[in-house]
Amino acid sequence: MDHHSPGPDSCAELRAQVRELTAAWRDAGRYTPRSDSWLRSFDLEFSRELATRGLIAMTYPEEFGGAGRTNVERLAVTEELLRAGAPVAAHWIGDRQIGPAVLRHGTRELQEEIVPRIASGEAVFCLGMSEPEAGSDLASVRTTAERVDGGWLVNGHKIWTTQAHHATHAYLLARTSRGERKHEGLTEFVLDMDAEGVSVTPIVDLAGEHHFNEVRFENVLVPAQRVLGEVGQGWKQVVEQLSFERGGAERALSSYPVLVELISESARQKDDRELRALLGSLVARLAVLRRLCFEVAGAMDAGQAPVQQAAALKYLGNAFEHDVIEALRRTDLCQDPAFDSPFGQALLASPAFSLRGGAAEVLLSLIARQEARS
Ligand SMILES: Cc1cc2nc3c(=O)[nH]c(=O)nc-3n(C[C@H](O)[C@H](O)[C@H](O)COP(=O)(O)OP(=O)(O)OC[C@H]3O[C@@H](n4cnc5c(N)ncnc54)[C@H](O)[C@@H]3O)c2cc1C
């Protein structure tokens, strides 16, 4: 990598702006910092405050309500929001991957309809990819969209749909035809969650929290202009979109509040040399992961979809976060952890780290396949 390209120390002003905002909200008791906040901490007001300040949709063109900034600048902001454990779930999915996907592949009409609403914090998106029989094997989706007068009729069943109960819109991957290969004949759509025939039922997770759901579609009419990209090219597009989903700082910083606890604990237990050595190696790994995040953001700024680097980042980031939690287990802090402490939250969320956004084994085979091709 070019030594002059922007890295983790860049964007000081933007970082200061986010630190000031999150400190003000936290000190006013408007949120409590938590682990995994990008998935579980939902506050429309906070997302709209960020939107007003130009801190979401940062990379989108100004004509669509964006700030016309770089992915590297966006990364600096997302790092700070995650460090602060701030309530960012309302805009995270839309901002991270739906806006960029619509900007890359959507018609002008779809861009004008959807992108400004993501930028203002008005549109809340959920991701309708996984199904009961299609998680890692996403190409096996069975939800169908059948062409009818004026649009498409959608029938099917999605699962693990994060924040569907709050969402105004869904991204949907559906089968529009049967080709010889299962990767063919898939199409992406944007649909309204209040459309007739959409129903949402909660799934309560290990921590007793409700953030994901099952979503059923029964003869839901989706207007023709809500096709995202080319009919039948959904697979190629979704693989690209997954690099936006996997390549961000949340893959290493979901449990940052726990790392801070570990650092404080190590300061208290000065004689525990083993703990200090462990902490040193974790902090060094974090530095490498952040560098990788900046490489991914730089590649996005160069117009690429860094599928392989994003998969590598997610794989290594998940392993890192597991090890942070394991390190904390050796300290007094985990004698009697409260479920709602950052440690308790991270511990209960951790079984999902290597699953959400793509299972570890699947990421490894993706990296290996790309490596073999290059
Ligand atoms: C917290 C959380 C939030 C989520 N949010 C969303 C969401 O908003 N929208 C959405 O669409 N999905 C969401 N998901 C779903 C998630 O992306 C899927 O769970 C994931 O893709 C794995 O699919 P699966 O659960 O069907 O597991 P499976 O595909 O059944 O995989 C189970 C295990 O089998 C093994 N395995 C599977 N395939 C292979 C292979 N090819 N090679 C080797 N081993 C393999 C792996 O060990 C894997 O961990 C979420 C999941 C979690 C945990």
Image: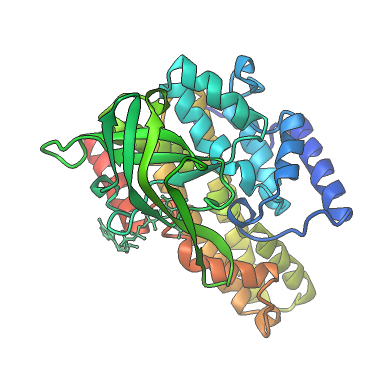
Camera-side residue of 324 and 53? 53
Q: Left or right? Give the position of 281 relative to 186.
A: right
Farthest right residue? 28
Q: Is residue 333 visible?
A: yes
Camera-side residue of 125 and 323? 125
Figure quadrant of the C terminus: top left
Q: Is residue 276 above or below residue 218?
A: below
Q: Is residue 15 visible?
A: no
Farthest bottom residue? 335
Q: Is residue 311 above or below residue 348?
A: above
Q: Left or right? Give the position of 137 relative to 25.
A: left
Tell me the residue at 69%/32% (across/down): 10
Residue 71 lies, in percent from the top left, at 58, 29
Q: Left or right? Give the position of 329 relative to 26.
A: left
Q: In which quadrant of this rendering is ligand 1 seen?
A: bottom left
Residue 326 lies, in percent from the top left, at 55, 73
Camera-side residue of 321 and 82? 82
Quarter location, residue 225: top left
Tell me the residue at 54%/27% (across/down): 114
Farthest left residue? 180
Colour approach in the figure: rainbow
Q: How many marks?
A: 0
Quarter location, residue 372: top left
Tell me the residue at 62%/14% (across/down): 63
Residue 161 lies, in percent from the top left, at 46, 53
Q: Is residue 222 above or below residue 194?
A: above
Q: Is residue 344 above or below residue 89?
A: below
Residue 314 lies, in percent from the top left, at 45, 50
Tell me the residue at 47%/42% (across/down): 245
